[in-house]
Image (tube, helix red, strand yellow):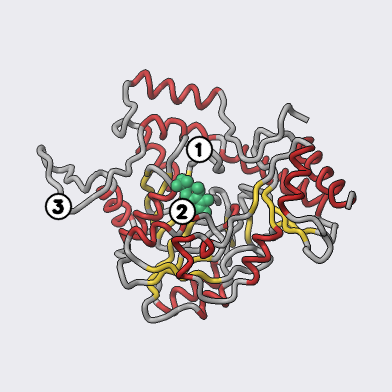
Amino acid sequence: MSNSILLDAPNLGALEKTYLNKALDSNYVSTVGPFVPEFETKFASYLKAGGAVAVQSGTAAIHMALYELGIKAGDEVIVPAITFIATVNPIVYVGATPIFVDIDSNSWNIDPKALRKAITPKTKAIIPVHLYGNPCNMAEIMDIAKQYGLFVVEDSTESLGASYGGKATGIFGDMGCFSFNGNKVITTGGGGMVTTTDPERAAHIKFLVNQARDAGRDYYYHPEIGFNNRMTNLEAALGLAQFERLSEFLSKKRQFYQEYQRILGGDNRLSLQQELPGAISSVWMSSVRFNSHRVDLTIPEIMAKLKEKGVPSRRIFQPLFDSPPYQKYKSEDYSNAYELFENGLNLPSSTLNSIEDIRYTAISLLEILDSI
Ligand SMILES: Cc1ncc(COP(=O)(O)O)c(C=O)c1O
């Protein structure tokens, strides 16, 4: 076991220092410099996307995606009941209305049946969230989107490296949104990426995030209202280094998930988040749900006992319509979402952990369940 077990801490080393030093030595620390376009090109080509634009955060990526698609007041955007609030806030930034639907209890992602039922004449877009890196049922979601003429903006902030039917998450829909926050699969400190299937949309987002400035003129001219959402050369330096290490991170996360599965998988008191057929998760966070009929401890009690053993954990996102700004959007039966919130837990998944840390965590969890 290493010194301390980590939930989601970033993994930074010599390569990151080399790239950062190159950025510092070149004196390009802000939004000008070669690393931003290099990061964008490599990212788009890895995903086989039509284009990629580096931005300041995953939240900004979702905001820019919705803005670019012209989502506005009066439009409805369908989202899963369980996600981080940053999936939903950008819907409100553009003046539209979030419509929450229940999740599927195996994948923990948006339930296509519930999604279909929530469509109205006002629906303009769907934001499927690949929760904790686990791909949504993109075959059904894309069929529904096609049938009703809806935009799809994938929240792939947690799923870099995940795929469904051999295709990367983030390139199924019109837009894909990634996050490089410190706890994500790779980090730039803080940052994000918007990917699109359409190179013209990518060029327009690139223009929007730079204050909609017309780069073809030798004076400041802004034909539209834009944003300052650009990534800096320093952040992109970190991103390029981390991106080179992506397969190392993904294989470690997969190994951790398999170890959790090996030790916990056969126990009927709990179940790990499940991949759909054809889906390969990034397993950004290995996560577990306890069977409330077989486990008498509450999630806060399990977390406290894990903490006593030196194991950090985190609760699943609370259904967002229980947060004050979103209470008015609560519209249907969300039994799967509540079941997951009340019984689910994120387990240590940082790639700084050793396999022994993961084994210790899984065994500790079983000891806690056995002790009651
Ligand atoms: C599901 C989800 N959506 C959106 C975001 C927003 O990303 P960021 O923190 O980079 O703004 C995050 C991460 O924080 C997330 O987990």
Instruction: Report if the beta carbon of the residue with label 2 is closer than 8 angstroms to ligand 1.
Output: yes
Q: Residue furthest front?
A: 324
Which residue, given by chain and number where applicable, does mark 3 sit on?
223
Q: Residues within 10 Å of mark 3 (few under 14, many from 20)?
A: few
Relative image position of residue 269 (x, y in whole percent): 83, 59
Callout 2 secondary element: helix
Left or right side of 22 for 203: left
Relative image position of residue 216 (x, y in whole percent): 15, 43
Which is more N-terminal, label 2 or label 1? 2
Which residue, given by chain and number where applicable, does mark 2 sit on?
86
Which amino acid type corresponds to the residue marked 2 in the rendered image? Ala
Discs 1/2, front: 2
Left or right side of 8 for 212: left
Which is more N-terminal, label 1 or label 3? 1
Which amino acid type corresponds to the residue marked 3 in the rendered image? Pro
Q: In which quadrant will I find the N terminus?
A: top right
Q: Is residue 339 above or below residue 229?
A: below
In percent of the image, x 42 and y 80: which residue is there?
120
Callout 1 secondary element: loop
Relative image position of residue 359 (x, y in whole percent): 80, 41
Q: Residue furthest top?
A: 25
Q: Is residue 353 above or below residue 304?
A: above
Residue nearest the viewer, comparing 331 with 185:
331
Which amino acid type corresponds to the residue marked 1 in the rendered image? Thr
Left or right side of 177 for 34: left
In percent of the image, x 41 and y 38: which residue is there?
39
Which residue, given by chain and number where applicable, does mark 1 sit on?
187
In percent of the image, x 55 and y 43: which residue is there?
184
Q: Residues within 10 Å of mark 2 (few under 14, many from 20)?
A: some
